[in-house]
Image (cartoon, rainbow, N blue to C red):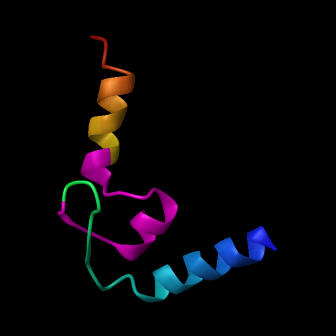
């Protein structure tokens, strides 16, 4: 049941891939698929990952 609902949400988001929507965290433009899959835009995901796991040179 949960898998079917999730599959439907992802399929719907893919059909709207040409649209842009606002990221709930930063307000920047992103795709509907990114919001369904991750909940935010790529920039917010990258910023979050840098906070939790900083780059080591």
Q: Which residue is drawn at 35% across and 57% down?
A: 40
* Residue extending farthest right: 1
Residue drawn at x 17%, y 63% as measured from the top left: 28
Task: Please give the name of the residue rendered at 41% of the width and 65% of the height, measured from the top-left corner.
Answer: 35
Q: In this view, does 53 lie above or below 23?
A: above
Q: Where is residue 26 in the image (x, y as percent from the top left)?
A: 20, 55
Is 16 situated left or right of 1 in this image? left
Residue 42 within the magenta-colored segment of the rendering: yes
In the rendered image, residue 1, in percent from the top left (x then y), is placed at 82, 74
The quadrant where residue 55 appears: top left
Image point (39%, 75%), residue name:
32
Q: In which quarter of the image is residue 5?
A: bottom right
How many numbered discs? 0
Please, is residue 18 above or below residue 51 in the view?
below
The quarter of the picture where residue 23 lies is bottom left
Q: Give the left or right position of residue 6, taking residue 4 as reference.
A: left
On the image, the x and y values in percent for residue 20 come to 26, 79
- Quadrant for the C terminus in the image: top left
Which residue is at the far top?
57
Q: Position of residue 9 (x, y in %)?
A: 58, 78
| Relative to 4, residue 29 above or below | above
Residue bounds of the magenta highlight: 27-44
Residue 35 vertical position relative to residue 26 in the rendered view, above or below: below
Relative placement, left or right, of 11 versus 24 is right
Q: Does the magenta stretch include residue 34?
A: yes
């Amino acid at each position: 049941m949960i898998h079917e609902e999730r599959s439907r949400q992802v399929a719907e988001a893919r059909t709207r891939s040409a649209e842009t929507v606002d990221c709930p965290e930063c307000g920047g433009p992103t795709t509907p698929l990114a919001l369904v899959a991750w909940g935010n835009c790529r920039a917010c995901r990258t910023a979050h990952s840098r906070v939790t796991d900083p780059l080591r040179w």
